[in-house]
Image (tube, rainbow, N blue to C red):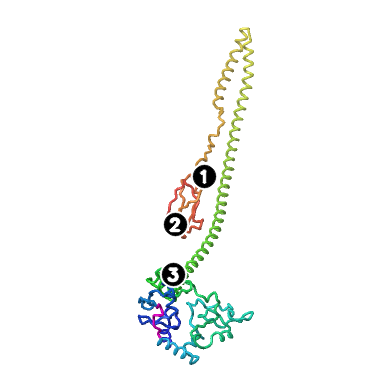
Amino acid sequence: MDTLESELTCPICLELFEDPLLLPCAHSLCFNCAHRILVSHCPSFDESSKPFSAFQCPSCRYVITLDQQGLDGLKRNVTLQNIIDRFQKASLSGPNSPTETRRCNPPPVDDDRVMSSPSEAVQCQFCEQDPPQEAVKTCVTCEVSYCQECLRATHPNKKPFTGHRLTEPVPDSRLRGLACPEHGEEKVNMYCVTDDQLICSLCKLVGHHREHQVAALGERFDKLKQMLDSNLSNLMKRNSELENLMAKLIQTCQHVEHNAALQENKLTEECDTLINIVQQRRQIISTKIKEGKVVRLRKLAQQIASCKQFVERSSSLIAQADQVLKETDHARFLQTAKSVSERVSMATASSQILIPEINLNDAFDGFALDFSREKKMLEALDYLTATVSRWQTVCLMTPSSRPSAVTQNEGPHRDETPEKHIYCSPFCSCEEL
């Protein structure tokens, strides 16, 4: 019976033929459907004037030319109409008939587009009560929802209502199909693959899509849904990967913060150690300077005492010699002058010996300070950014210098681990062992 019903269905309205016309190509078409095709294909068509017109058969594309009588010139397919009448009567014979089954359990309409949400309450659109009763069925053919009482009143179990399709209550906003943008009264029921857009039957028959490749909505729905589902799965997978990566990045940021704090503490400790060493060396060198000053001042004090003693002795000798020179008596002068002259000569000789021993140099030649090399080393202290991975790095210094840093690393290199950098001076010779 299902196969017979499909044979009795109009290719345009997808309903049982109503007042079918027999076309010259032997196919059939509802009178109203043929009239709609003719009006859409020939805008100047006038039922009263009935000019010569032509249209294509929707089944075989055969061009049907009409005479002055128009559609009235085509024969009615009486045999097909009789078969439809008998089919409709047979469908009323029991509850398991195809029509009754279709009325009670209709197939999904427009690819589940009109399936209502369980939480949505649909009210009867035919009730005169206020508020209306809750709908129990929706007639897809009438595009109206009915309560049980209104359904019995408006859809008796006889022609033509036996051909109406009933479904579970559907909201009105989802019941009415999408209208064709070119043919406003028609609903889209197929998909143009060439132009990638929804079209109606008239677009395919007489519109600019008649030579285009078309596909059923269900077929296109399944294909596009599968593609969207695949793309969505890929996007969700990428999103999950990015979320995991973001979590790792956040964790890495925390590690960087922690390791940087450790390095700050390490830097403070190392600088404090250097400062302590400098302070200790300063104290030691300062002590040596003070000791050298004491030794030098003691020696100078001894020399001052020697000079003072010599000056005191020589002053008395000078006074005595001056008195001798004042003597006018030759005999007395000769008597004392010789001994005084010898004493003056000896004192002069003694002063000649004392003067070279006196050192008037005030410089500390033995305490030369030159920290220029150390200053450059301190100014050049910085991270060595070279990768230290699975190698032992040792700073080899000259015998007179001190190593700035020695580090050993056996683990893999990680950028977020500041400990893998070492402090070193540019004056050292770093080698990898």
Residue 190 seen in this snapshot? no
Q: Residue furthest front?
A: 49
Q: Secondary structure at mark 1?
A: helix
* N-terminal label among 2 and 1: 1
Q: Which residues are magenta?
A: 69-77
Q: Residues within 10 Å of mark 1 (few under 14, many from 20)?
A: few
Give the x, y percent position of residue 24.
35, 80
Mark 3 Cα-neighbour bin, 10 Å: few <14, some 14–19, many ≥20: few
Q: Which residue is mark 1?
A: 379
Foreground: 76 or 68?
68
Furthest residue toward bottom:
93
Looking at the rendered structure, the kind of residue marked 3 is: Gln
Disc 2 is placed on an element classified as strand
Residue type, label 1? Glu
Q: Nearer the viewer, mark 2 or mark 3?
A: 3
Q: Residue at x 58, y 36 (%)?
A: 292
Which quadrant: the C terminus? bottom left
Q: Tell me the residue that label 2 is attached to.
A: 391
Residue 302 left/right relative to 381: right
Mark before the other along the chain sequence, 2 or 3:
3
Q: CA distance from mark 2 to mark 3?
A: 66 Å
Q: Is residue 329 above or below residue 273?
A: above
For disc 3, the marked residue is 197
Say whether residue 8 is magenta. Answer: no
Nearest the viewer among 327 and 257 is 257
Secondary element under disc 3, as helix, strand or loop, is strand
Residue shown at 49% from the left, 77% from the top: 112
Screen quadrant of the N terminus: bottom left
Q: Using a 10 Å C-alpha cutoff, classify the residue at mark 2 as few (fewer than 14 neighbours), some (14 to 19) or many (20 or more).
A: some
Relative to 62, is 292 on the left or the right?
right
